[in-house]
Amino acid sequence: MVVHSSSSAEPAAAEVLHARYASRLPASLEKLAGPRHGVVELPLHVAWSGLRAYDLDRPRLCMGLYRTVLAEGQHEDLVNLLNHDLLLSQWPVLRTLVSRHVRQVWEKAFPELASRGAVAA
C-alpha cells in the first residue's frame, strides 16, 4: 500500500498563483497611469488570441480590457495600461469577473479596493 502525504515540499497551486499576481503589483494604485479614454491595443503577450483592441469609452469593452490585463499583464502592463480612477470605479463589478486569486491579491495589497468591494456586496 502506498500512502501519499498531503504535506509536500511543493507549494499549492493557489500559493503559486498568489505569488505570481503579487509579484506584478504596482507599489501603489496611483502608479496606474494608463489612459482613461480612447482605443487601447493590448500587446500579444497579454492578449494572444481573440480581441486585442478595446475602446475604453464603451463600458463592456473597458471591463474586458481590465479583466484581461489583471489576469495576464506583467508589472509594466499594469502600470501602463490600467488607470487608477477607472480601476477604482470599476472594481465593485470587476472583482466579480476576475479570478479569486487576482481579487484576493489586489484587495489585500490595496485596502481601498477591498472597501469598495465590501460596499457593493
Image (cartoon, rainbow, N blue to C red):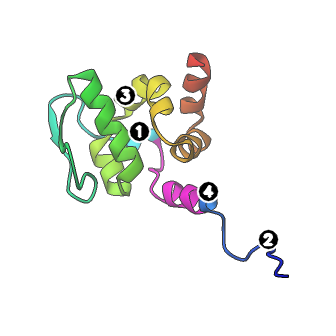
| Mark closest to the chain's N terminus, 4 or 1 | 4
Amino acid type at circle 3 is Asp
Q: Label 2 belongs to which residue?
A: 7
Q: Label 1 belongs to which residue?
A: 30
Give SS at disc 1: helix
Tell me the mark number nearer the camera, choosing from 4 and 1: 4
* Mark 4 → mark 1, Cα distance in angstroms: 27 Å
| Mark closest to the chain's N terminus, 1 or 2 | 2
* Mark 4 → mark 2, Cα distance in angstroms: 15 Å
Give SS at disc 2: loop
Q: Which residues are magenta?
A: 16-28
Q: Is residue 104 above or below residue 60?
A: below
Q: Residues within 10 Å of mark 1 (few under 14, many from 20)?
A: few
| Mark closest to the chain's N terminus, 3 or 1 | 1
Q: Label 4 belongs to which residue?
A: 14
The answer to the question of whether label 1 and label 2 lie on touching residues, with beta carbons closer than 8 A, is no
As drawn, the label of residue 94 is: none
Please identify the quarter of the rendering in which residue 52 is found: top left
In front: 88, or 14?
14
Judge left or right: residue 84 versus residue 19.
Answer: left
| Mark closest to the chain's N terminus, 4 or 2 | 2
The answer to the question of whether label 3 and label 2 lie on touching residues, with beta carbons closer than 8 A, is no
Q: Label 3 belongs to which residue?
A: 85
Tell me the mark number nearer the camera, choosing from 3 and 2: 2
Q: Is residue 110 above or below residue 119?
A: below
The answer to the question of whether label 4 and label 2 lie on touching residues, with beta carbons closer than 8 A, is no
